[in-house]
Image: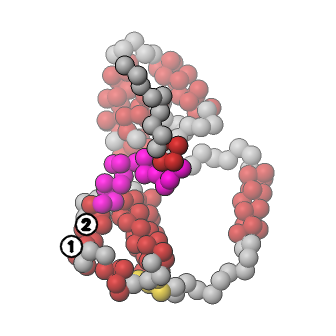
Amino acid sequence: MNVKPTNPKDAFGIKKASLSCVSAPVLMEVGIGMQEGGCKYGRHNYRVIGVRGSVYYDATLRHVMSWWEGEDIDPDSGLSHITKAICSLVVLRDAMIQDKLTDDRPPRAAEGWLTPLNAKSEALFDKYPDPVKPYTEADNLWIEKPQTMMDEINQLGSRNLTFEAMAAQRAAHDACPNTRHGGLPRMVEQKYT
């Protein structure tokens, strides 16, 4: 059987805008989020009546902040707050592309306003080369769920892992600069993150 090594269309197709680089599960979640908006407000209403930038800026930040503060799911939609934030940005960007955006941003900040703040942040790392590790949700588990954590430690102990071995593992874990939650033994951290 004679087979061509490649389809001639490949040479042209690979240079076009691609969706194969976008996560399908995320894209489908965004589709559900946009469908919810369509049911509530009318599908593609933003392309007809337009949007104000501040409304979508605020909505995006509310969702991101809710997620950052530990609320993973938007109670109104049942979707991830991150998905809802992406939906807000999709509407905002589409309005920009379609020339349906009312740009109500404040007067422009001075160019380079972030540069001196970044320099101050960098100076803090110079001043405190070994900063105290940040406290995270994982740290709360030691406080809020001590019995659960002790049960986990006891299970580990039943696998012939001595307290000294666990302490050595924790010390090695704490010394790792890329540790996500610093301070938790890796095997416990994985269960509760």
Residue ID at (50%, 18%): 165
Q: What crowding class fits label 2: few (fewer than 14 Cα within 10 Å), some (14-19), or many (20 or more)?
A: some
Residue ID at (77%, 62%): 119
Residue ID at (35%, 23%): 154
Would you say residue 111 is visible in this rendering? yes
Q: Where in the figure is residue 22, as x and y percent of width and height?
A: 43, 50
Please give the residue where the numbered disc 2 appears in the rendered image. 35
Numbered range of the magenta stretch: 15-31
Q: Where in the figure is residue 24, as x and y percent of width and height?
A: 35, 48
Judging from the image, what secondary structure is the residue with disc 1 in?
helix
Real-space Cα separation, disc 1 to disc 2, in angstroms = 6 Å
Front in this rendered view, residue 182 or 42: 42
- Rendered image quadrant of residue 182: top right
Magenta-drawn stretch contains 30: yes
Q: What crowding class fits label 1: few (fewer than 14 Cα within 10 Å), some (14-19), or many (20 or more)?
A: few
Q: Amino acid at mark 1?
A: Cys
Judging from the image, what secondary structure is the residue with disc 2 in?
helix
Front in this rendered view, residue 35 or 81: 35
Front in this rendered view, residue 184 or 38: 38
> Residue placed farthest to the left in the image?
39
Would you say residue 71 is visible in this rendering? no
Q: Is residue 41 left or right of residue 133?
A: left
Please give the residue where the numbered disc 1 appears in the rendered image. 39
Query: Label 2 near label 1: C-beta < 8 Å?
Result: yes
